[in-house]
Amino acid sequence: MPGSKRFEILRNRPVNKDGFIREWPELGFCAMRSPYDPAPSLTIENGKIVEMDGKRREDFDFIDAFVADYAIRQEQAGESMSAPELGIARMMADINVPRADVVRMVSGCTPAKLARVLDYLNVVEMMMAMQKMRVRRTPSTQAHITNRKDDPAQIAADAAEGALRGFREEETTVGVARYAPLNAVALLIGSQTGRPGVLTQCAVEEATELALGIRGFTTYAETISVYGTERVFVDGDDTPYSKAFLTSAYASRGLKTRFTSGSGSEVLMGCAEQKSMLYLEIRCLMVTKGAGTQGVQNGSVSCVGIPAAVPSGIREILAENLAAACLDLECASSNDQSFTHSDMRRTARTMLQFLPGTDFIFSGYAAEPNYDNMFAGSNFDAEDFDDYNVLQRDMMVDGGLRPVKEEEAVRVRQKAAGAVQAVFRRLGLAEITDEQVEAATYAHGSDDTPERDALADVLGADQMMARGVTGLDVVKALAESGFQDIADSVLQMLKQRITGDYLQTSAILDENFNVISGVNDPNDYQGPGTGYRVGGERWKEIQEIPNLIETD
Amino acid sequence: MDGHSNTDNRILSGTGVPLEDITLEAVLAGKIAPDDIKISAGTLERQSGVSASAGRPQMAENLLRAAEMTKIPDNTLLEIYNKLRPNRATKAELEKIADDLGGLYGAPRCAALVRDALAIYEKRGILL
């Protein structure tokens, strides 16, 4: 048979470079429901859960034990476990049922119960539910700020531009581990230069991340990973109990935390126990809930290639996000690691969180070109900024970003790079030259910037940690270099950890450092005319994209 | 505590410095130490109350554990965290940690968490 020209064209489409497989539940390649998922059940005797999802207490692994003892609300369990799953699913999608009723119902469910509930919903119903169930009324989004050179001037410049564009959280990580304190400080300075009030974090090994937080180089922590099977948890070198202790430790220093989980990690690490990805992720979420941290980053995150390869996998990712929201957790809903060669497919995947809105639609939009994204590339990057702004405008949706003017972006980039140059000088770190500041100001990515002396940088970082430099020294260095306004903003960020209001669920800060959280900005969506609506100044801002035909 | 802002002048840092005294001028004059930028047990207890009122009992409990931990030095917290990781501690070590938390540090909630961990770690074979 001669080959079809049409099929040849189709074969060469980007989507056909992606990897797809059939369901294979024995290895955990199963999105929403595996034939091996347990049937929901719960038995309570003398105030203790003695059986859950078909397993007796003596057979509990440490995840079962933690979920049973810390997460499930026993006083609610009777009503929740006897309610039909379809009925709870309808409560989620029904605009006439208040958010609080769903939260209460879900608080008494076991993992298997919640998984079955979610499997009744199609993606549109899940989006309806997410619009109602996300904790914070006002949606927002988060950026990744990284580059291949770990160039502090570029980190500061990208952080400043990102803040100006509207990101309310910015996350960095490192190419070289010992750079962590430098990247954290550059991010802290840059973020406050672009638009004050942005929360910042540096994703590194747990103990280092805590140390950076205590120093005042970061303002929250996110990479506190939890897993859905015991063996993978042990391979990850933690337990629900160690993570619960860690999250309390952060809070004891006034620092906001959120856990990280997501489907596919158990499959990737070779131990999914034949369970569906959604069931395992709900176990993670219930560990998160039981530990009492305010929220989670989930939606497969860095294992997205696994759910994306199986049928209903992108739907499963939204189901995970929705499960988090129904458990009354802040949800930073991924849209993170890139997973497809198809622009169509990556955009469609993001619409599931973008359209209903989540607490953070992205838990890592690459605010640099993807070649500089040290989290292995994000689903959207700096080259998509204008597309994203147009999507907001087309659909009258608040995706958390706004159009900015070129001269304004250049101005904050220059100021941020100059401020980090001055602070490095004051703190005795490796010199940032005027040429580097200039390059970072006008750069798109690290292809446009000079090389750094990596050895001098890491030695400087080591010395800075050894000397006991803290966030207060950064404040002083900024003020003494003439950057009073940035100094004051960094100090305001440090003071958040004394008041603790931003420890409450789904907290972000506005540019005047007012906390906006699930406590003072609770989601009150209950159908048309209620909840968060795009309007007023925000709608004007969204409309004013640079590429407009002037009609005057 | 709706709309409660960070300018609330009733708030003291962990070392007892009023929030409004932590200004740029005070920092530049060397009057503020890193330890002054720490939350107090009282503030954490108050935030725990806010969480409980918002229907989040697990979070309220976490913040009460955190309030207890304000008295525990940074390095000790890190050491205990590491001991709670799998295959890092003997039964006797975790028992000692729980006893110290309950006694020396006056942290009964943290002690209870460690005891719960110990019981299941022993059953699951992840003690040294």
Image (tube, grey):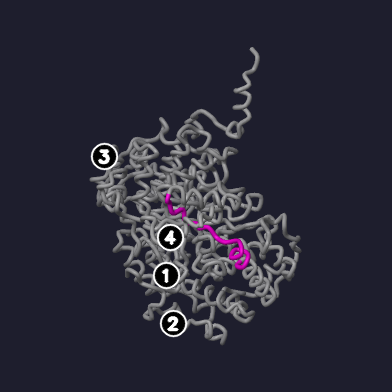
Q: How far apart are marks 1 and 3 (CA)?
A: 39 Å
Q: How packed is label 1: few (under 14 Cα within 10 Å), some, or many (20 or more)?
A: some
Q: How far across and how far down the image is residue A510, in percent?
A: 45, 67
Q: Name the residue under label 2.
A: B20
Residue ID for mark 3: A87
Cβ–Cβ under 8 Å for marks 3 and 2:
no
**Front position among marks 2 and 4:** 4
Report, in whole angstroms, how far the alpha carbon at label 3 lies from the one at label 2.
51 Å
Residue hosting label 4: A538
Measuring from the top left, give residue A17's x and y in whole percent.
61, 33
Q: Is residue A169 magenta?
A: no
Amino acid type, callout 1: Asn
Q: Residue at x 49, y 38 (%)?
A: A272
Mark 3: which amino acid? Gly
Q: Mark 4 lies on which chain?
A: A
Q: Can you tell which quarter of the image residue A178 is in?
A: bottom right
Instruction: Compare residues B70 and A62 and report the one nearer the observer.
Output: B70
Residue under label 1, please give it: A514
Q: Which sits in the foreground, A73 or A13?
A: A13
Secondary structure beneath dot 4 equals helix
SS state under label 1: loop
